[in-house]
Amino acid sequence: MSLAESASLPLAGVTARQALRKLRLAGGRRLLVTGGAGAVGGLAIQLARRAGATVDALVSRPEHRAHARTLGAELAVSDAAALPPDGYAAVFDTAGVDVSAAAAPGADYVTVADAPLPMLPGATKSYVQEDAADLAALAAAVDAGELRLRVAAYHPVAEVRRAHERFEAGGLLGKVVLLF
């Protein structure tokens, strides 16, 4: 992969890996990932599947459902009302969407979104921390072909405003990368 493409891994990948660790994923647990077509959510789906979890995704647009399924989501929906009530032992929220009705009683709930926590016991936020071991593990998974990266757009640094506007518009299938 190119150096520019590899630049999309550290923040999104380490964020996903550390949040999933808080969810104590084990084989067979059913996980819901909100924002499943985004950079963090897409990596989370892949990492959780590698850990043996059953993963479903909530995406922002109907056209993103197929993408989430190609990453390993068994069910991908664009309407939170379509999620099974009390269906998930764990929820990883990357989008700030209240999906508490889909969380089973006693479910683990972690968010990285800048949104209020739902009224669920034990719901928590995950704040990414630099971690060389996490990044090395992610890079090894990419090198082994076990983890796919997705870049939505490349912009020269002179177009930083345009890149930021594109990011803020949402609906991206991956990261926006600035080229220096």
Image (spheres, rainbow, N blue to C red):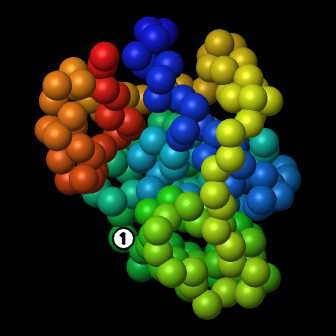
Using the rendered view, name the quadrant where residue 77 is placed.
bottom left
Using the rendered view, name the quadrant where residue 5 is placed.
top left
Residue 30's spot in the image, x, y percent?
Answer: 71, 61
SS under mark 1: loop
> Which residue sits furthest top?
2
| Amino acid type, residue under disc 1 in the picture | Asp
Of the 4 image quadrants, the one containing the C terminus is top left
Left or right? Give the position of 17 relative to 68: right
Question: Is residue 69 visible from the viewing direction of this image?
Answer: no
| Number of marks in the rendered image | 1
> Which residue sits furthest bottom?
119
Q: Residue at x 74, y 87 (%)?
A: 121
Q: Nearer the viewer, residue 128 or 91?
A: 128
Q: Nearer the viewer, residue 11 or 76?
A: 11
Q: Nearer the viewer, residue 2 or 71?
A: 2
Q: Residue at x 74, y 76 (%)?
A: 107
Mark 1, other Cα within 10 Å: few <14 / some 14–19 / many ≥20: few
Q: Residue at x 24, y 53 (%)?
A: 168
Residue 124's spot in the image, x, y percent?
Answer: 68, 73
Question: Is residue 96 visible from the viewing direction of this image?
Answer: yes
User: Which residue in the structure is indicated by mark 1?
Assistant: 79
Relative vertical location of residue 160 with respect to residue 171 in this rendering, above or below: above
Left or right? Give the position of 52 relative to 180: right
Residue 81's spot in the image, x, y percent?
Answer: 42, 79
Residue 2's spot in the image, x, y percent?
Answer: 44, 9
Relative vertical location of residue 131 with respect to residue 93 in this rendering, above or below: above
Q: Residue at x 31, y 26 (%)?
A: 178
